[in-house]
């Protein structure tokens, strides 16, 4: 009897699976009963069960056909590497009530060597849900499902896939190690609420390469415990830019360390590169080794932004400064246009000032004129590395077109000039936090050309701008927290699972 059953099972397996010329066993979703424009949830679950049990590398294949898919949670561990190749389109239910808002629409978890590929589209059908989103007014608003959840994956790849119109964040990466997104596309209208692109938390060695992200919220956001994150050749916009944080709200947050953002373009985004931490909250984690290099800004409102007084809708007390320590952050070769007069805003914590912040080769303009910079509780090192620039500067100064170092020092700020043959640096010592020192920095393509202290009028204008930074993402200020809060639950499940 048992033997007969296993023969039947084996025969079934032969019917459903086929081999490619390579090593992969193919599980075609059509063989599991999938038909065009119909719901294929059960077919996918069955295919997953078989593919995940395969002792040879498996591939679930979706042809270039549109299907409907309800919420699925596809779990490993699997016996061998597994790939899901979607050549067509998968559509979520448009009605948000049909999905559990606390879970993602399509979830892949606890898998080693997972690949999602195929050039296909995952359409979250968000517009109905966005219309119902009242999270801006209602703290207990309904949770909306994200398109993708990638949890506890190792050595995995998502390539040639589009995530469209998610009801909420597009992608949540949690507890993953060595995961790469390449040629990944995210699209949602600028006006869609909380449609962050990729949120990464408690994960290491995550790469986002050659991808484009257009959303109504953060393009990529890094939550606590993000380590060794590499973002390369990514175009962002519309949206709110690449953000670290917000951090500091909770006491159990892990450090964020090791981020490289290189060769990226921001187009019409609210922010470019941003770090945000809450004041008046207990979290005392650290943020270090963040490097932003070779970045183009096109009409970006806040191109470079550190905000340690991040407190949307006055949800916090500003009585005490942020306890999150930021160190070793470099901004290098950042060029283009700003949509506001302030290109660089570094507002660090008075409790734990930023350390070793470096700016070089910053060339940002607003209406054709160089942008200004605002620095609080930070001594940025402003420098350039090429030897020839030193000579260039000397020439200019001889012509008398520059504000001299002494001039700056006399205004209550100390400026150290450090010159040697191959390194020219200016170290600005901004001690005068009481008045919130504002430095108007003209930073040319080839380094620092001129530094001018802002006048009272400039300070006034900047103060007004700061008042109105309410962005759509703040509507669910706890969204990142919610993602983090999921971790202990997931970890428990992980332990139980093994
Ligand atoms: C992923 O790697 C971590 C750390 O090495 C390990 O503890 C975990 O079991 C791995 N998960 C899978 C699904 O292989
Ligand atoms: C990371 O994952 C990729 C994709 O599976 C794999 O080819 C690569 O060897 C992994 N890298 C390390 C350091 O394990
Ligand atoms: C950058 O990404 C685009 C796709 O967005 C791709 O066509 C191009 O080849 C990538 N360039 C590099 C240098 O990787
Ligand atoms: C990356 O650099 C290449 C070469 O300079 C450039 O053509 C491309 O637009 C850059 N990619 C982004 C996303 O900025």
Image (spheres, rainbow, N blue to C red):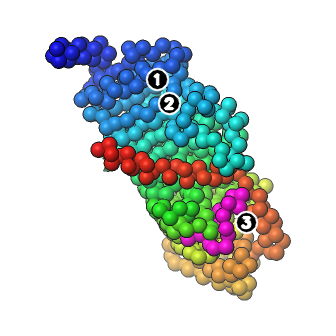
Q: Which residue is mark 2?
A: 71
In the picture, the disc for residue 477 is none
Q: Which residue is mark 3?
A: 372
Which sits in the foreground, 294 or 100? 100
Which sits in the foreground, 465 or 486? 486
Indicate the secondary structure of the residue bearing disc 2: loop
Disc 2 and disc 3 in contact, CB within 8 angstroms: no
Q: Residue at x 56, y 75 (%)?
A: 352
Which sits in the foreground, 496 or 431? 496
Look at the image and give the residue range highlighted in magenta.
306-323
Task: Residue 316: say if magenta.
Answer: yes
Q: Residue at x 51, y 27 (%)?
A: 70
Name the spot of residue 55 as percent of width and height, x first.
Answer: 24, 29
Q: Which residue is mark 1?
A: 41
Q: Is residue 40 above or below residue 414?
A: above
Indicate the secondary structure of the residue bearing disc 1: helix
Disc 2 and disc 1 in contact, CB within 8 angstroms: yes
Name the spot of residue 361 as percent of width and height, x first.
Answer: 60, 63
Q: Quadrant of residue 464?
A: bottom right
Q: CA distance from mark 2 to mark 3?
A: 48 Å
Q: Quadrant of residue 382?
A: bottom right
Name the spot of residue 187 as percent of width and height, x first.
Answer: 61, 35
Name the spot of residue 428 as percent of width and height, x first.
Answer: 62, 77
Indicate the secondary structure of the residue bearing disc 3: strand
């Amino acid at each position: 009897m048992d033997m007969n059953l296993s023969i039947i099972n084996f025969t079934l397996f032969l019917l459903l699976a086929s081999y490619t010329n390579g090593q992969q066993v193919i599980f075609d979703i059509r063989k599991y009963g999938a038909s065009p424009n119909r719901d294929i949830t059960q077919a996918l679950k069955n295919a997953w069960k078989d593919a995940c049990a395969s002792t040879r590398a498996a591939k679930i294949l979706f042809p270039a056909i549109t299907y409907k898919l309800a919420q699925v949670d596809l779990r490993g561990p699997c016996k061998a590497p597994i790939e899901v190749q979607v050549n067509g389109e998968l559509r979520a239910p448009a009605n948000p009530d049909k999905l559990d808002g606390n879970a993602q629409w399509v979830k892949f978890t606890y898998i080693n060597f997972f690949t999602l590929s195929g050039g296909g589209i995952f359409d979250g059908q968000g517009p109905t849900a966005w219309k119902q989103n009242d999270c801006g007014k209602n703290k207990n608003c309904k949770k909306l499902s994200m398109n993708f959840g990638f949890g506890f994956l190792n050595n995995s790849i998502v390539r040639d896939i589009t995530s469209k119109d998610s009801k909420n964040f597009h992608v949540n990466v949690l507890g993953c190690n060595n995961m790469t997104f390449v040629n990944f596309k995210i699209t949602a209208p600028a006006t869609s609420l909380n449609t962050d692109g990729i949120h990464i938390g408690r994960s290491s060695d995550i790469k986002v390469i050659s991808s484009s992200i257009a959303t109504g919220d953060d393009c990529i956001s890094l939550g606590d415990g993000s380590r060794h994150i590499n973002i390369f050749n990514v175009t962002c916009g519309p949206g709110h830019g690449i953000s670290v944080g917000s951090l500091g709200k909770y006491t159990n947050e892990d450090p964020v360390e090791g981020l490289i953002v290189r060769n990226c373009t921001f187009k019409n985004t609210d922010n470019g590169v941003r770090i945000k931490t809450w004041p008046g909250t207990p979290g005392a984690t650290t943020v270090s080794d963040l490097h932003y290099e070779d970045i183009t800004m096109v009409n970006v409102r806040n191109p470079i932004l550190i905000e340690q007084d991040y407190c949307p809708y006055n949800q916090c007390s500003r009585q005490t400064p942020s306890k999150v320590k930021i160190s070793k952050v470099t901004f290098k070769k950042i060029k283009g246009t700003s949509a506001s007069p302030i290109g660089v805003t570094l507002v660090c914590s008075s409790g734990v000032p930023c350390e070793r912040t470096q700016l070089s080769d910053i060339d940002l303009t607003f209406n054709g004129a160089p942008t200004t910079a605002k620095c609080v509780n930070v001594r940025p090192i402003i420098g350039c590395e090429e030897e020839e620039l030193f000579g260039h500067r000397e020439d200019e100064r001889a012509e008398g077109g520059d504000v001299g170092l002494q001039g700056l020092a006399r205004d209550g700020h100390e400026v150290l000039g450090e010159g040697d043959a191959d390194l020219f640096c200016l170290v600005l010592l901004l001690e005068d936090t009481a008045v919130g020192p504002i430095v108007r920095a003209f930073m040319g393509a080839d380094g620092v050309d001129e530094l001018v202290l802002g006048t009272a009028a400039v300070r006034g204008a900047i103060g007004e701008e700061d008042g109105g930074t309410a962005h759509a993402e703040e509507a669910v200020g706890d969204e990142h927290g919610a993602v983090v809060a999921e971790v202990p639950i997931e970890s428990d499940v992980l332990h139980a699972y093994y």
